[in-house]
Amino acid sequence: MTHAYPLVAAQDPEVHQAMLAELRRQEEQIELIASENHTSPAVLEALGSVLTNKYAEGYPGRRYYGGCEHVDTAEDLARNRLKELFDAEAANVQPSSGTQANQAAMLAMAEPGDTILALELNHGGHLSHGHPKNASGIFYKFVHYGVDPETEHLDYDLVRKLAKEHRPKVLMAGASAYPRTIDFQALGAIAKEVEALFLVDMAHIAGLVAVDLHPSPVPHADVVTMTTHKTLRGPRGGAIVCKKDWIKKINSAVFPGSQGGPLMHAIAAKAVAFQEALDPSFRRYQEQVVANAKALAAGLEQRGCRLVGGGTDNHLMMVDLRGPKGPGITGRIAEDSLHRANITVNKNLIPFDPEKPMQTSGIRMGTPAVTTRGFDVDDMERLSGWIDLVLRDPENEKVIQEVGEEAAALCRMKPIYPHMEAVQS
Ligand SMILES: Cc1ncc(COP(=O)(O)O)c(C=O)c1O
């Protein structure tokens, strides 16, 4: 075992303190934020490599700078592996984030002022799908569809109705907080019916799609964006796959349309992560992610919590904290109390939520990160009991302390980075 980050420690103790504290936080707390994961040490190594020094505006074989032959190799590997992973015709691995991938996709597919039909943010959509203060909402005219008030499942009839009424240039699908399977085939058919382009943001479910545990949008969509750091378990970043006919426009929309020099260290790390995702062990990992989500959801339901949409088909669930048998607290209080008990979740608006975004009536939880460190369904059953105890008595410091100790003990049994020691060197 080596002390973590010895060079930063020697040179810059202030930054080192923050890095160590974050390593310790990740090791000692149960991470249930659905959009987070823990990358492999190999991905971390690529991220910390000399590739960060290289300017490489352009694409492999056509760069605006000399000396790009080795970063070309890394980018070609990343692109080819991504195409293989999703059985896609073409790929762009340069977007620095999911939001920038979406921005580039919209730039390629629509003109400013065009109508885009997407999932309502309060029903699980993402801010890059038309939030009024995001570039998407500023440059395009967004119309939003939502979930059915009874089932809280996507309302495909409503999508069709709105699509016929508004004739959008682009129909967009994908979500940040939707626990059920998305029928991309049905949405693709609606897009065809109204002659709209079909854009899918599969940021959350990319890892599940890669191993066929969620139906793929790739055969149905013109363009598919994703993040690489959620279920896909790579470095923080974005990527795009598309039909061959779209790649010229997409490449131009990424660079020079919305970015300058690509982060070549991140692209190398994406290549490493995509190879990991092509390995058969990645399918077993994703199966466990789904099994763990189902076990956590079942444990919470048995204890009287109401799950939005009636449960989960994927890696995440939304808990409605209200209702006759619910704990009756806001998402904000739940997030704070669970955090003090070493369990990290995020407050989240639920469909038709009467609370404000900083309060909310719900929390969102997901299993990608805990599954990476080896938690199994028995751990999920115990975890659901701890979460329930804290939610039903959120001011009880004794309960919080006891749960916190149990959570930390479980974490110690399942270290994430056993080769790194989170102590001052
Ligand atoms: C569906 C969806 N798209 C895009 C993003 C944005 O990703 P980033 O934070 O990398 O910009 C997110 C992030 O949570 C997301 O959930």
Image: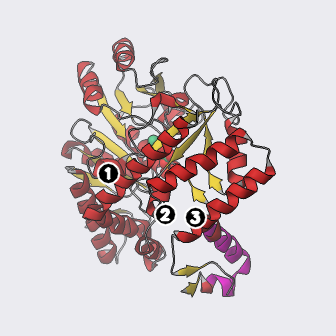
Q: Amino acid at mark 2?
A: His
Q: Which residue is mark 1?
A: 251
Quarter of the image where the N terminus is located: bottom right
Q: Are marks 3 and 2 in contact (CB under 8 Å)?
A: no
Residue 29's quadrant in the figure? Answer: bottom right
Residue ID at (51%, 28%): 123
Across and down, in percent, residue 172 comes to: 38, 32
Q: Are marks 3 and 1 in contact (CB under 8 Å)?
A: no
Give the extent of the magenta segment: 8-23
Across and down, in percent, residue 74 comes to: 31, 71
| Circle 2 SS class | loop
Residue ID at (41%, 62%): 234
Image check: 226 left or right of 192?
Answer: right
Image check: 68 left or right of 47?
Answer: left
Distance from disc 3 to disc 1, alpha carbons, whole Å, reads: 45 Å
Q: Amino acid at mark 1?
A: Asn
Distance from disc 2 to disc 1, alpha carbons, whole Å, reads: 29 Å
Q: Are marks 2 and 1 in contact (CB under 8 Å)?
A: no
In the image, which disc is placed on residue 38? 2
- Tell which of 29 and 133 is nearer to you: 29
In the image, which disc is placed on residue 172? none
Q: Nearer the viewer, mark 2 or mark 1?
A: 2
Q: Which residue is mark 3?
A: 410
Q: Nearer the viewer, mark 3 or mark 1?
A: 3
Mark yes or no: residue 157 visible: yes
